[in-house]
Amino acid sequence: ATFAPILSADRAYHESHSVADITNQCFEPQSQMVKCDPRQGKYMSVCLLYRGDVISKDVNAVLSSIKTKRTVQFVSWSPTGFKVGINSQPICVVPGSELAKVPRSVCMLSN
C-alpha cells in the first residue's frame, strides 16, 4: 500500500502536487508502506484511489504516460492492470496530527 503525498503541515503550504506528481510518487520505494523496492519484480494489478481535486482527464493522461514509458512492469497475463476510483471529497486530517490537509491525494493498493 502507498499514500501520496505525505507532507507535514509546514511543507504543504509551500508545495503543490499535481495528479501526475502524486501518482508517480506511489511507485517510488520511499512512498511504500512496506520495506521493498517496487521497481524490482512485476505487478499483477494496481488500484489507485484518488481523493479531492482530481479529474479523470488528468488520471488518464498520467496512466497513459506510465504505460507508454513502461516505467511500471506488469505480469504478461495482465498488461493493463490499473483500476481507478475518484472521490471528489479531500481527505480528512486528524486535528493536531503532523499530516497536512492537501487538496488531492492518492492511495495505491497493489500486488
Image (cartoon, rainbow, N blue to C red):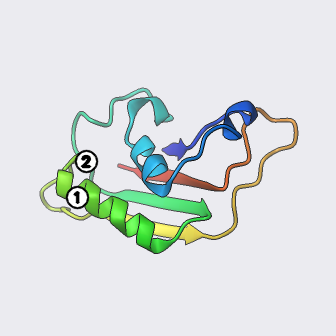
Q: Residue furthest left?
A: 76
Residue 8 placement (x, y as % from top left): 70, 32
**Residue under numbered circle 2:** 72
* Rendering coords of residue 15 (x, y %): 61, 40
Residue type of the residue flagged with mark 2: Val
Instruction: Identify the element where label 2 is drawn.
Output: loop
Please report the residue visible at 20 percent of the width from the left and 62 percent of the height from the top. 78
Residue 9: name its quadrant: top right
Crowdedness near tag 2: few (<14), some (14–19) or many (≥20) residues, C-alpha within 10 Å? some
How dense is the environment of label 1, judged by Cα within 10 Å: few (below 14), some, or many (20 and up)? some
Name the residue furthest top. 35
Q: Earlier in the sequence, mark 2 or mark 1?
A: 1
Q: Are marks 2 and 1 in contact (CB under 8 Å)?
A: yes
Give the left or right position of residue 21, taking residue 14 as reference: left
Instruction: Tell me the residue at 14%/61% (across/down).
Output: 77
Which dot marks residue 97?
none
Q: Is residue 29 above or below residue 47?
A: above
Q: Residue at x 46, y 73 (%)?
A: 56
Q: Is residue 67 above or below residue 21?
A: below
Q: Is residue 18 left or right of residue 15?
A: left
Viewer-proximal residue, 29 or 10?
A: 10
Looking at the image, residue 42 sits to the left or right of residue 28; the answer is left
Which element is circle 1 on? helix
Q: Please give the residue where the numbered disc 1 appears in the rendered image.
A: 67
Answer above or below: position of 73 versus 59.
Answer: above
Give the CA distance from mark 2 to mark 1: 7 Å
